DNA sequence: TCTCAAATTAGACAGATTCTAAGACTTCAT
DNA sequence: ATGAAGTCTTAGAATCTGTCTAATTTGAGA
């Protein structure tokens, strides 16, 4: 992944390009597996400069607020993060909790009636079932 | 809500009808506001018999596994629960995190190609934006 | 160079959920 | 009715995730 590209996307989001912030963004742009904050912390600290846990969380928050990163909540597990490159839906595995990207397609938005006074911003489609790794051992009941 | 109905739905799910489990299921069937485990704990303990926190969580897990209850993960907040009466989508407020029901409508499932070896079980549509209560004060930045 | 806001840090803290180990309750076969 | 075996509940400890605090460092701009 080109350093220029990463730096530019931070600046586009109105964020200064600090070494720690750069490391988080770079890791997310290079890894599409929806890592958790803990995984990002571990990964970026295998190389210098070291980032503290607080900084990982601070930067993830900043990146999400800037719209550069998406946070995916998974029931009962740590949040996962995702550099929003191209629009896409998600598939979440019932068994292992893995989040996988699914090709984007539009679906009809809810009509004004059912929205009422709510202000619509976006939607996403979540598919559930068993991922390719879990499907074969479907019979076994526990992770 | 009819006691018979609640009891029957537990048995349909293959679960024994204990007083504590009944209390959780009854509360969920009578309250559509997607309560958290803590809210359920507090509510069912305003009357006897008392349920411990562990029992609330145990029973919520059992109910979810039995397919009687849905768990809704919201970024950065406690999980919310939902007796799956009628099929519906969800609207989640960006500002206050409230989860609201939206009328169900079908959308096209992903094609076999993009599913690959995954086993599809269900999908849900999540809308995001501002709820009716938050929309008016849209300008203010913090909850 | 100086100043000041922004960013980082270690560690304390808090909230949500799970785990543990013991006891109580059910079921079911005698 | 009795006893064994499994299921359920419980209090509290433990764990995991994420936030906060207060002190320090950094770096952009004057
Ligand atoms: Mn993704
Ligand atoms: Mn609902
Ligand atoms: Zn899986
Ligand atoms: Zn709201």
Image (cartoon, coloured by chain):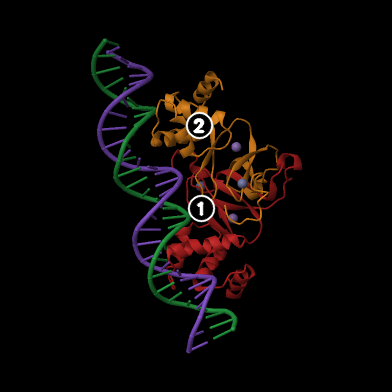
Chain colours: A red, B orange, C purple, D green
Give the farthest residue toward the right: A112
Residues under numbered marks 2 and 1 in contact, where contact means CB atoms less than 8 Å apart: no
Q: How far apart are marks 2 and 1 (CA)?
A: 25 Å
Is residue A139 at least partly visible in the picture? no
Labels 2 and 1 in the same subunit: no
Q: Which residue is drawn at 64% across and 36% down?
A: B88
Q: Where residue B42 sits: x, y (%)?
A: 45, 35
Of the pair A11 and B66, the residue shown nearer to us = A11
**Depth-wise, is mark 2 or mark 1 nearer the camera?**
1
Mark 1 surroundings within 10 Å by alpha-carbon count, few (fewer than 14), some (14 through 19), many (20 or more): some
Is residue D11 rendered to the left or right of residue B112? left
**Above or below A19: residue B109:** above
Q: Is mark 1 on a helix, strand or loop?
A: loop
Q: Where residue A113 sits: x, y (%)?
A: 75, 39
Of the pair D17 and B30, the residue shown nearer to us = B30
Q: Which residue is drawn at 48% across and 61% down?
A: A57
Q: Which labelled disc corresponds to residue B66? A: 2
Of the pair C12 and A16, the residue shown nearer to us = C12
Q: Which labelled disc corresponds to residue A79? A: 1
Is residue A13 at least partly visible in the picture? yes
Q: Where residue D30 sits: x, y (%)?
A: 59, 83
Is residue A7 rendered to the left or right of residue A137? right
Tell me the chain of label 1. Answer: A
**Above or below B62: residue A1:** below
Tell me the chain of label 2. Answer: B
Determine the image quadrant of residue A43: bottom left
Q: Where residue B3 sits: x, y (%)?
A: 52, 20
Instruction: Look at the numbered disc 1 and say if its residue's Cβ is closer than 8 Å to ligand 1.
Output: no
Quarter of the image with the N terminus of chain B is top right
Q: What element carries label 2?
A: loop
């Amino acid at each position: 992944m080109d350093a220029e590209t990463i730096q530019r996307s931070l600046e586009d989001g109105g964020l200064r390009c600090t070494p720690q912030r750069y490391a988080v963004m770079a890791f997310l742009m290079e890894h599409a597996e929806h890592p958790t904050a803990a995984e990002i912390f571990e990964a970026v600290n295998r190389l210098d400069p070291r980032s503290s846990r607080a900084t990982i969380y601070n930067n993830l928050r900043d990146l999400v607020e800037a719209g550069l990163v998406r946070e995916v909540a998974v029931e009962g597990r740590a949040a996962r993060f995702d550099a929003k490159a191209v629009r896409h839906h998600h598939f979440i595995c019932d068994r292992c909790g893995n989040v996988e990207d699914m090709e984007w397609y539009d679906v009809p938005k809810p009509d004004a009636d059912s929205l009422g006074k709510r202000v619509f911003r976006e939607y996403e489609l979540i598919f559930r079932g068993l991922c390719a790794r879990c499907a074969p051992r479907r019979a076994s009941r526990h992770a």
